Image: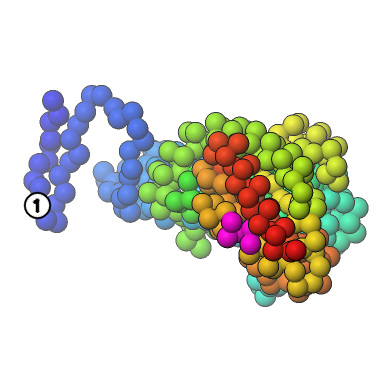
Amino acid sequence: MSERRNWQPQPGRRADWPESASRPVATPLQPSVVYAAESPDALDAQYEGRLAGWTYAREGHPNAAQLAGMIDALEGVAGGVMTGSGMAAVGAAMLGLVQAGDHVVGADQLYGRSLRLLAEDLPRLGIATTLADATDAGAIEAALRPETRAILVEVVSNPTIRVADIEGLAALARERGVALVIDNTFTTPRGFRAGEVADVVVHSVTKLLAGHSDATLGWVAARDADTAARIATAVQTWGMTPAPFDCWLAERGLHTFPLRYDRAEATAARLADALARMEGVARVLYPGRAEHPDHARAGRLLQGRFGNMVSFELAGAAAAGAGREAANALVRAMPALPFAPTLGDVGTTLSHPATSSHRGLSAEGRAALGISEGVFRVSVGLEEPDALIAEFEAGVAAARAALR
Ligand SMILES: *Cc1c(COP(=O)(O)O)cnc(C)c1O
């Protein structure tokens, strides 16, 4: 049995952890903020990297390191760092890559907060930005300046599910010596190995990787060692380190990520086909379908891994006025389905970009992106496919009735 060297359980004096020759099978949760070193010599050795060890949780802790290592393995990269959210990962990537006077080009259909970071926050810090269409490497090239340091793109856009010209962008970034930053949240490393082409990869781990809507986390990794070190320092200095418990939860989720992804993707393909057959649906946006504008590119780039995200537009709902009523009717006819602007949960979630992610745009701005009041985005989860399709049939029928 275990021996305790220092067994004085009293307030203010913690006892040594009971020793065990056997080890726990599940990952221990280590919430300790501080770590006591054996001596100043030992602490010195730790800071110099001669001894492995933790010092203070903001600088790093075992639950974050364990989780980062698992995501590194999925992406096929080394040295990834966990952050307290996906946006912290995007922010840390920028802090590691650019400084005042530099220029960043971003896709014009990025995640809403990333768009805000580029449109408002970076310029305030003296970093100029330009947004351009990432499905066209020529449009991104036209936005480059001599002082451009980074291009930020997502592989698959929200909510129109357009596929970026990653091959063209990777070639362009190489040729011009600009860092290609890929937010691989939607596609996940199972859909696309961003680590093979990007200089920096970021994930909102909150979404599919953790997968249970109970932990807010991000991950960021850089190919180049200097950039990776600057990003890691930014995470420590700006205080972007995540909580151990969130990492512990996400690690638990990550063990089933490949199974969840495959199942959700298979159901998404079936749902996309079923929606396309439903009367009352004007169009379905899923890269696995032949009529998708980027179907050929998605076939090459994603190699048949078309993901769990499906968008669709109700027929007749693009007309001014009628759309909102139809959208309300659809959501109300599907009460078991969370109407929530997130993705990657074990359960299917439904979002309405016109009133959530894209509400900040004018009606004309949304129209230019093809986002009418009748557009819905579905993050497909793990339900029985037939039951899920039946729910959508009821929702679309209710929307049709509302338009009559
Ligand atoms: C959700 C999301 C983010 C931000 O992640 P948080 O964990 O919510 O901060 C960034 N990029 C994409 C593509 C996302 O879907």
Residue 73 visible, this angle: no
Residue that mark 1 sits on: 10
96 lies above or below 185: below
Q: Nearer the viewer, residue 57 or 67?
A: 67
Determine the residue positioned at 37% across, 49% down: 245
Could you tell whether 271 is left or right of 257 in the image?
A: right
Residue 177 forms part of the magenta stretch? no
Count of marks overlaid on the render: 1
Q: Is mark 1 on a helix, strand or loop?
A: loop
Q: Which quadrant of the rendered structure holds the N terminus?
A: top left
Horizontal and vertical percent position of residue 251: 45, 39
Q: Is residue 248 visible?
A: yes
Q: Residue 329 at x, y = what percent? A: 63, 62
Give the magenta-colored segment's residue range.
329-333
Q: Nearer the viewer, residue 261 or 57?
A: 261
The C terminus: image quadrant = bottom right
Q: What's the residue type where badge 1 is placed?
A: Gln
Residue 247 screen position, x and y as percent: 43, 46
